[in-house]
Amino acid sequence: AGASLNAGAHFELLGRSKLIETTSSWIDWSESQLEQEKNALRERLIGASESGKVTMVEWNNAWQKFTRSRDVYLTLDAIEQTGNHATYHSVDVMDQSALQELGSSLGRPITGLVHGAGLEDSKLVADKGYEVFDRVVRVKVDGWRALLSAVVASGREVPEFACCFTSVAGRFGNGGQTDYAAANSVLDAEMARLTATTDCRAVAIGWTGWRDVGMATRGSIEAVFEAAGIETLAVQDGVSIFVAEALQGGKRRVLGCGSLGQMDTFSSFREAPLKLPPQMAATIADPSRFPFVDKVLSLDEGVRLMTQTTLSTEDHPFLLDHAIEGVPYHPGVMALEMFAQTSLLLQPTACLAGFEEVSFGLPVKLIKGPMTVRVEAVVERTKDDMMWVRCRLISDLANSKGEVFGEREHHEALVRLVEKREDLRPFLHREVEALPSIGTPPVGSLLHPASFIYDRYFHGPRFQSHGGVLGGVGDADQPGIDGLALMRHQLPATDQFALEQHGESVLLEALPMLIEAGFQNAGLVAMEVLGYSSLPVGIAWSTMLRVPEAEEALRLRSLQTEALDDGTTVHDVLVVGEDDAPVLALKGLRLKAMANVDEDQRFALER
Ligand SMILES: NC(=O)c1ccc[n+]([C@@H]2O[C@H](COP(=O)([O-])OP(=O)(O)OC[C@H]3O[C@@H](n4cnc5c(N)ncnc54)[C@H](OP(=O)(O)O)[C@@H]3O)[C@@H](O)[C@H]2O)c1
């Protein structure tokens, strides 16, 4: 509540303890006032007892009812002071029907759940009664179920946020705590399930022992911790951990602990995961949203972002159809897509306008199986509604033992972003002005089918985005070709990502297959005119004006504007849809000659 001042949020606090109304006026009492009251209670107990005696245990137990009640009033008061609201309900969390009743009586949906009820009674299983085992497990597991049923009764399927307080014992195991470890482990898994299968952002925080409050301060637990080298956690640090997890999100199972001493037999500690802003955490939690972002490695919000992806033919079957002599090459257009995804994650209020200064360098080859690559995105400049983000695709250089000794840069580009606005017309106007003036490919019938192209190219069905040749255009100085361009769902095989093989849809940002169609079309021109097969090495500028309709038939034109002595050719490309409306354009696409085309594959188009 303190981290969300004056939010007007409602906190419903649950516990079995009953409120004793008189204690509501005790919240400002000093220690000596409490002491006095405690002594007065003793007198009353003695007066009421037949034997005229009362034991210390009886006295303390009776007093505890008052202090617990006062503690609840203190908590309610502290929450109210933050500009939020709090109500206490005396209920057993395992009582499902009582919780359902509570949920439906609130008159508003429960949007967050924090399950902190727990019992701990350490004893070897052989010495433990069934009752104890049962209660330790049920307060956590049945308690959680009942809490969820309260949410449903309040009018929601699942809460927006959920947190279970679990334990390092659930993650590492601990002597005498089989029941407790199992119950916590169930809740750990449950938080992961909720996040993976629902809209709820759920986290299990596995705590070490807390210092000063709670169950770990009872009996000899603190001494046992110390002997085992297990560091305890100050309450304030625990609160900070909880608040960060609740408000920022990140991993689904976290540990709130210091050194775990003997408990951590396998020294399993890794670097703490990065805390991401909730919107970013939620975006990348959806595997179909930014499929090329497996992980965020570092973030300086609004300035710089480093993401990581592991490319594999299992997860990215398109690689199988972009293979040269059996070696999958990560296509340049998918590198551009990665740049777009990382830039948009860095700048979620923008949309993609296009690219500039694209340079394709060392290809990413999957010679020995999966390959992990990183994208670094750094905001380079902004002007009015536009932003330019410099992106690099990098991988590690490793020796034969797998030791990393440096990094390798593959490709680089400036991603052009435009702020999302109601009225994008001024932006679109500027983009249309900047389109290459190469005319519009006319509607017509195919001169050569797609097979004409793929007899000459290495691309498999998931990368065959050229739909066939309409005809030659231009002149000897500026030769060109018109053709058909296919979107991802129009390809001969559409399962570019493994997710798509399981019926999921994957959203890409940069229309990579249309850029690819541009590359392939320009490549055909170079092939026809120079007799070389060539590969793209750069793009001076590109724009993406709109996402075409699903059924739209797209045409494209490319004109070769220059042929340099070193075998480089330069091309402009335009993709249009129905009504000749422009979709995408490339200016200054540079292709580099790689190999001679076999004589029997040479061709010449009429112009
Ligand atoms: N303290 C630690 O060192 C530590 C370490 C690891 C994990 N944890 C976990 O953190 C959570 C809180 O621990 P804690 O130390 O604060 O425990 P605690 O001092 O025993 O407090 C437990 C809280 O849960 C409530 N509760 C217990 N059983 C309940 C039931 N059946 N129905 C409704 N409320 C119930 C209790 O209120 P009433 O008594 O009024 O019912 C009390 O407010 C537990 O889940 C525990 O497993 C704690």
Image (cartoon, rainbow, N blue to C red):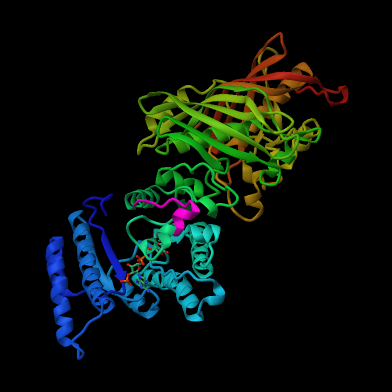
Give me the residue at 42% from left, 31% from top: 418
Residue 345 showing in the rendered view = yes
Q: Which residues are magenta?
A: 224-234
Left or right: 511, with 451 as reference point: left
Q: Position of residue 127 (x, y in %)?
A: 53, 76
Q: The N terminus lies in which quarter of the figure? A: bottom left
Q: Position of residue 537 (x, y in %)?
A: 65, 21
Is residue 49 depicted above or below 498 in this figure? below
Q: Position of residue 208 (x, y in %)?
A: 44, 55
The quarter of the rendering in which ligand 1 is drawn is bottom left
Give me the residue at 39% from left, 66% from top: 219
Give me the residue at 47% from left, 27% from top: 378
Q: The C terminus lies in which quarter of the figure? A: top right
Residue closer to the observer: 361 or 574:
361
| Total numbered badges shown on the rendered structure | 0
Please say whether residue 111 is one of the residues in the magenta stretch: no
Left or right: 367, with 126 as reference point: right
Please say whether residue 227 is one of the residues in the magenta stretch: yes
Residue closer to the observer: 61 or 475:
61
Left or right: 93, with 36 as reference point: right
Is residue 119 depicted above or below 171 in this figure? below
Image quarter of residue 487: top right
Q: Position of residue 361 (x, y in %)?
A: 65, 22
Give me the residue at 16% from left, 61% from top: 31
